[in-house]
């Protein structure tokens, strides 16, 4: 298991409450390599391709067509817990527990929205955004699972605020707080990039 933590700079903090917390894990992202093997990544892709893909939307808006594509251009479908997918949820769930215990200590419950399978073709992208908002304010942690071999396409990097680029190792997972801004840069050529997006919910932040 490979774990990388980026520390938050508290040099200019105006203190309001003296909580006993570890400042080294605040505002961090968490990474585990090879959560899924290449063969397992192919199996996940095959399961997703059995479903109908739709254009990715924006939560809480009625945008469509070119207006939507200027912000987000991706095809997706949902994967939900059943006999065929339980192993995927079990593997991701254990990694989320590892991430939360190591880096966040948030109150979390589970993945109530299933998994979102993402299919980016040339030109596909998603501008800066957060995974929390009026309709999904209980999202605590987000995660991305890389399914495609990064050598088969170009561009389409996922960037977190602060200039942090997610590792693209096939089968790896990156976990981060849902309130962090992030984006997917344009896909510039080659095979489609495919990934899983994960959202973990819990009680409102307090």
Image (cartoon, rainbow, N blue to C red):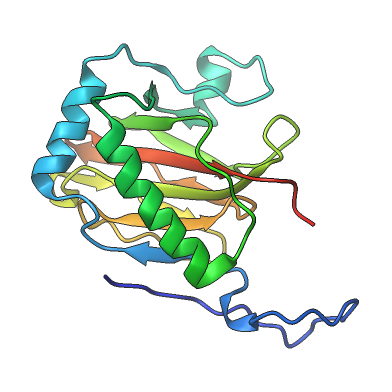
The vertical placement of 75 against 104, above or below, is: above
Residue 194 visible to an observer of this rendering: no
Residue occupying image coordinates x 21% and y 58%: 34
Residue occupying image coordinates x 27% and y 55%: 172
The vertical placement of 169 against 18, above or below, is: above
> Does 199 sit left or right of 173 as displayed?
right
The vertical placement of 79 against 204, above or below, is: above
Residue occupying image coordinates x 71% and y 39%: 137
Q: Residue 61 falls in which quadrant of the image?
A: top right
The residue nearer to you, when weighing 157 against 169, is 169
Residue situated furthest bottom in the rendering = 11
List x then y, in percent, for residue 96: 44, 54
Residue situated furthest front in the rendering = 83
Residue situated furthest left in the rendering = 39
Q: Residue 190 falls in which quadrant of the image?
A: top left
Image quarter (top left, top right, bottom left or bottom right) of the N terminus: bottom left
List x then y, in percent, for residue 155: 30, 48
Residue occupying image coordinates x 23% and y 25%: 84
Image quarter (top left, top right, bottom left or bottom right) of the C terminus: bottom right
List x then y, in percent, for residue 141: 55, 51
Residue 57 visible to an observer of this rendering: yes
The residue nearer to you, when weighing 142 against 183, is 142
């Amino acid at each position: 298991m490979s774990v990388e933590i980026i520390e938050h700079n508290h040099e200019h903090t105006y203190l309001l409450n003296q909580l006993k917390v570890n400042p080294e894990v605040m505002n961090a992202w968490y990474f585990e390599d090879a959560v899924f093997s290449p063969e397992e990544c192919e199996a996940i892709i095959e399961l997703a391709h059995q479903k109908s893909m739709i254009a990715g939307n924006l939560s809480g808006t009625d945008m469509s067509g070119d207006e939507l594509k200027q912000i987000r251009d991706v095809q997706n479908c949902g994967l939900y817990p059943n006999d065929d997918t339980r192993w995927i949820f079990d593997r991701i769930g254990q990694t989320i527990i590892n991430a939360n215990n190591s880096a966040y200590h948030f109150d979390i419950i589970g993945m109530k929205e299933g998994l979102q399978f993402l299919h980016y073709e040339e030109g596909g992208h998603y501008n800066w955004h957060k995974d929390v908002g009026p309709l999904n304010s209980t999202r605590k942690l987000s995660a991305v699972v890389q399914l495609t071999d990064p050598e088969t396409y170009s561009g389409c990097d996922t960037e977190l605020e602060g200039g942090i680029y997610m590792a693209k190792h096939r089968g790896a997972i990156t976990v981060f707080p849902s309130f962090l801004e992030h984006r997917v840069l344009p896909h510039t050529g080659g095979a489609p990039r495919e990934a899983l997006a994960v959202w973990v919910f819990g009680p409102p932040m307090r």
